[in-house]
Image (cartoon, grey):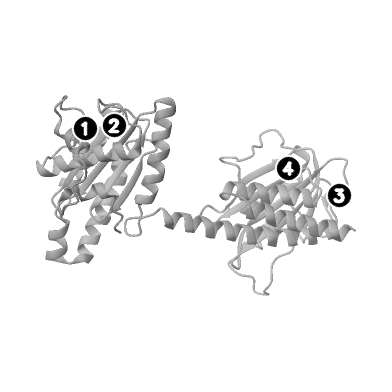
Amino acid sequence: MGEDRRLVAVVALAQGMAAAHGPREAWRAAAAGACRALGGSFAALSVWERELGRLKVLVNVGALADGEEEFPEDEAYPVHQFAEITEFLHERWAGGGEPDAWVETAEGPAAGRRPGYCHQRVAALRRRGRSCCVVAPIVLHGRAWGELYVARPVGEAVFERADADFATVLASVVAAGIAQTERLEEARRLAFTDALTGLANRRAVDVRLEQAIERHRRDGAVVSLVVCDLNGLKQVNDTHGHAVGDRLLERFGSVLSLCGAMLPGALAARLGGDEFCLLAVGPPADQVVKAAGELCRRASELELGEGVACGVASTEDPIGPVRSARRLFRLADAAQYRAKAERAARPVVAGRAGPDDPVMRLADEPPTGGDGERRRFRGRHAP
């Protein structure tokens, strides 16, 4: 009967991680599932940060002690303090297979633990009112990824060898779940990332802008969009080749990202070809225009190209009601079209030239479908 319960617990752990939406949910599902499976009162999942030489706690679940948080920002432990874990933090295991879990108790060594007495873990158990813990290294792609830690409170039965063996199985299930989560996250990242520049792509902008406009309609949040064309890219491609043109796009992408950092939470994106944008939710329009001006200045200083044509549209400016993402995009695009036509060295801002603003007229005109700059209104998705 006990074996049946453990099999059910393994299935529940795997299902919980498979149903998770994103890494944090997967971490919580892993720790909570292992805690239930082992009859613990507390569990934690930690990752080995190789470059920092430490185990960083990703999530704590169950009965938290003073100072413990569910998703801690800075709870980490130097691996050199834990003699019994460092033997598992090698790139590969010479003997093959995966390391076994072991048990620690508040009284010292316990059944099923490996050689080496870990005073740090024992002290932590006593300090937090726990009687014992089982520690299971997590191995991913043949390398140590981190550890699964499950504890019981004072007064409950101490973990035994069989519990340590079961924890080893649970750690393997957790590793498989983490691998699946990482694959899904990578797929999501690629789906919303421009391959050349590493910026967000048009799909990401469309999703984020729709959410931003919904927030604007709901609570009046300021939404601003900067749309820009990198001037002279065709000439660079024709004169120096497409490899050099790609380097110009990458360099401008870095400049865009740098200027976007002036706006908290802004999304920097490449829409396609020589078109880029910044989407900001929250910052005042003047702050966005200032960042766009800095973008124009820095773009003019690039060794290749001919600067950038930049248009801005913000719900904080007198542009009329913005009930759709398309409306704001058309206004920003029309401002950029005017900046390009006038070879403006500064951003053109929709709504700031009075009631006869030509940008407003351009945005209200239907798309021409011609071969000129107005092609943008068709929502091009070229890579």
Q: Secondary structure at mark 4?
A: helix
Q: Which residue is mark 2?
A: 314
Mark 3 residue crowding within 10 angstroms, few (<14) / some (14–19) / many (20+): many
From the viewer's perspective, is the residue at label 3 or at label 2 nearer? 2
**Rendered image quadrant of residue 232:** bottom left
Is tag 2's residue or tag 1's residue first in the polypeptide sequence?
A: 2
Q: Secondary structure at mark 2?
A: strand
On the image, the x and y values in percent for residue 62 come to 73, 40
Q: Which residue is mark 3?
A: 158
Tell me which amino acid carries mark 3.
Answer: Val
Q: Which residue is mark 4?
A: 124
Mark 2 residue crowding within 10 angstroms, few (<14) / some (14–19) / many (20+): many
Tell me which amino acid carries mark 1.
Answer: Ala
Q: Is residue 31 left or right of residue 222?
A: right
On the image, the x and y values in percent for residue 32 come to 71, 47
Mark 1 residue crowding within 10 angstroms, few (<14) / some (14–19) / many (20+): many
Residue drawn where x is 63% and y is 45% of the image:
59
Q: CA distance from mark 2 to mark 1?
A: 8 Å
Q: CA distance from mark 1 to mark 4?
A: 60 Å
Q: Identify the image quadrant of the N terminus.
A: bottom right
- Whether residues under marks 4 and 2 lie with C-beta atoms below 8 angstroms apart, the answer is no
